[in-house]
Image (cartoon, rainbow, N blue to C red):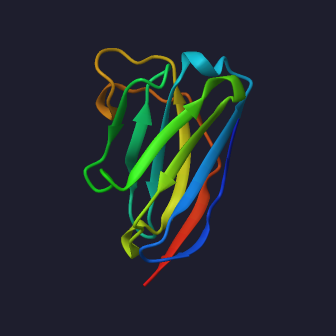
Amino acid sequence: VQLQASGGGLVQAGGSRRLSCAASGITFRRYVMAWFRRAPGKEREFVCEISESGGRTVYADSVKGRFFISRDNPKNTVSLQMNNLKPEDTAVYYCAADNKLIGELGPENNEFDYWGQGTLVTVSS
């Protein structure tokens, strides 16, 4: 199983960036996919997730209205469109996969089996 995240880099505050995560070795359409991030010196935090079909999404309050998650099941990819970026969005971003969701979509109900290696996004002020 491999989750390969890409798209990180340096961006100015107020700018946009699109991350992608390509999955292999799993039946992608059966997995909830999520993005997490870890900022320097901080613990990993939930960013957003998307249901297996793509019909439902959940976002952390800190990114709601600025970040948008989407998926392409035939291509086994999940993307994160990040707009109006802020310096506090600087972090390593990780994609994760879960096929054990019980209950409503949300990080409290997830059990993520697989994680990508992360891609660094740096937002300059």
Viewer-closest of 22 and 74: 74
State which quarter of the image contains the N terminus: top right
Look at 57% across and 55% down and name the residue there: 18
Residue 93 left/right relative to 49? right
Between 5 and 85, the one nearer to me in the picture: 85
Question: Residue 31 location in percent, x, y?
Answer: 54, 21
Q: Residue furthest bottom?
A: 125
Can residue 1 be spotted in the picture? no
Instruction: Compare residues 91 and 124 and report the one nearer the observer.
Output: 124
| Residue at the (55%, 74%) spot, across then down | 11
Look at the image and tell me whether residue 36 can be seen. yes
Residue at screen point 42% across, 74% down: 14
**Furthest-left residue in view?**
61
- In this view, the residue in front, 7 or 1, is 7
Horizontal and vertical percent position of residue 61: 25, 50
Residue 24 occupies quadrant: top right
Q: Which residue is painted at 59% across and 52% down in the image?
A: 19
Question: Does residue 105 lie above or below 39 as drawn?
Answer: above
In the depicted structure, whether residue 68 falls above or below residue 90: above
**Residue 82: percent from left, percent from top:** 47, 57
Q: Quadrant of the C terminus?
A: bottom left
Q: Is residue 78 above or below residue 103?
A: below
Q: Left or right of 76: which side holds 35? A: left
Q: Which of the 4 quarters of the picture holds residue 51?
A: top left
Q: Looking at the picture, how far across and down is residue 10, in whole percent? A: 59, 74
Q: Number of numbered discs present?
A: 0
